[in-house]
Amino acid sequence: MRKWLPLVAVSLGSFMLIVDTTVVTIALPDIGTDLNASLSSLQWVMNIYTLVLAALTLSAGSVGDLLGQRKVYLLSLAIFGGSSLLCAVAPNLGLLITARGLQGVGGAAMFVTSMALLGTTYEGKDRGTAMGVWSAVIGAAAAVGPIFGGLLTQSMSWRAIFYVNIPISLVTILMTRAGFTESKKPKGARIDAPGLLSFALASGALTYALILAGEKGWTAPSVIGLLAVAALGVAFFVVAEQRHPNPMLDLALMRNGSFLAIMLSTVASAWGFASLVFTSLWLQSVVGLSPVKAGLALVPLAATTFVVSTLSGKRLHGVSSRVTITLSLVLIGVGCALNGLVVDGRSSWAAVLPGLVVIGSGVGIGVPATGAAVFAAVPPQRAGMGSGAMATFRQLGQALGVAVLGVVFVDTIRSYLHGRVDAPDAAEAALTSGQRTTLPVLHDAGAHGLTTVYFFAAGLALATAVLTVTLIRNRGTDAPRVPAREPAEAH
């Protein structure tokens, strides 16, 4: 049992982290009523968390490599638990948003170091099993989050969704102290401050631009300005990484075809997840389900992910990452295309069930496969950097997916409603906010919007599958490893 104690500690922390990203969505109306907050202000309870995660994920992985993954994981749990307490007692929206930003700091470090801890603690088949169970727990957490949040909010209060994190954090801290030993730190290494700051600027500006693009459009001056800042940040980051003796991201990794393919596959998979946001809206506005029932309708995807991840992590350990990652993307693409073909204005929640199961199978194969491939591509002392890069690509891919697919969803609905209803703006607002609609023309418009989103996600997944076949050339179980860059001695 002690052998798997580290896995339990990491899975428990990750479960808390992922659940907390979804339960807040359900609680937002109650938070707005209790704190007398406007809709635009409430959006920052979600957006600040996304911004901080995107800005700090890669940095957290690098800091974990330098200071020790166990130490940073323990610190992240303490930050997450403490900020959850601040969220729970927040008397106003300003303090709640600030506390959510602190949760993002803890969450970024927790997510990256948890993956790195598994990669350095387990080897061979045990690593495949651990990555499979961990990814299955994440899938289950994403599904039960809305249900869990709805039950807590309805039976107690929105504050309960934050209070529950405190005992979980304490238990996870105790298990981590007992289950892990500290990792070896590289000699003479120092924190890459220029890289950390420039990447935080670039990723934060890009994520904020994507958030605003969904509200104001891609041509808004503020969006264009933020994209320019992001591009400038990337340029500074590249220069900083080339000059620093111990960079937070070794750019040689991005010249490795296998590693690049892994990163692109995480982006494509994230778009598959982003499509679920619009599936949830369709389930509530067109099918007429409550938020809790809409969450239940998505459980088949999570359940399939859980089962397939648990089995594939161990059973597919000896299969080439080229095969497993490509298979994962093909299944995600086929599942999205299937839902795009079958949904119409008269469909019930059951129409998306087969597609969700296929998507869940792809995710279940892909998460442990990409995790194992990343750890095979980087040296052990840079496990945090590898996992941080993968988590960053996934986070930015999710943000980009929601923004781009959101534009596709709204534009498709707007085009369909033009000339068919007297007040297209009001009808569009109802469909995109989750309000239940009864007019058949609105049901058709919502279905058209969702099917277009699914086809876009399918196209990206299948195109990326072609790239993985081309770029990942290894025949063994692992991607070609990039040698570690020796850090300069500290003076």
Image (cartoon, grey):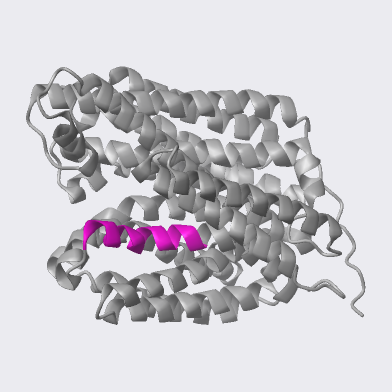
Residue 221 falls left or right of residue 20: right
Q: Nearer the viewer, residue 212 or 62?
A: 212
For the point 74% across and 37% down, which residue is it?
Answer: 258
Magenta stretch? 38-52
Q: Is residue 23 above or below residue 325?
A: below
Residue at the far front in the pictured view? 221
Point out residue 179 in the picture as x, y percentages from the top left corner: 59, 75
Residue at point 60%, 50% (across, down): 230
The answer to whether residue 4 is magenta is no
Q: Residue at x 12, y 38 (%)?
A: 288
Q: Quadrant of the C terminus?
A: bottom right
Tally of numbered tags:
0
From the viewer's perspective, is residue 78 above or below residue 480?
below
- Residue 443 visible from this viewpoint: yes
User: Residue 240, located in which quarter of the rendered image?
Assistant: bottom right
In percent of width and height, residue 155 lies at 13, 67
For the residue pair 450 and 291, the one nearer the viewer reads as 450
> What's the residue at 29%, 29% (across, down)?
352
Q: Position of residue 458 (x, y in %)?
A: 46, 25
> Can the viewer see residue 306?
no
Q: Position of residue 268 (x, y in %)?
A: 53, 35
Residue 334, picture quadrant? top left
Q: Nearer the viewer, residue 430 or 66?
A: 430
Up the image or down, 339 lies above or below 251; here it is above
* Quadrant containing the N terminus in the rendered view: bottom right
Q: Magenta segment: does it hold 40?
A: yes
What kind of secondary structure does the magenta stretch mostly adopt?
helix
Answer above or below: position of 91 versus 30: below
In-front residue for pair 356/266: 266
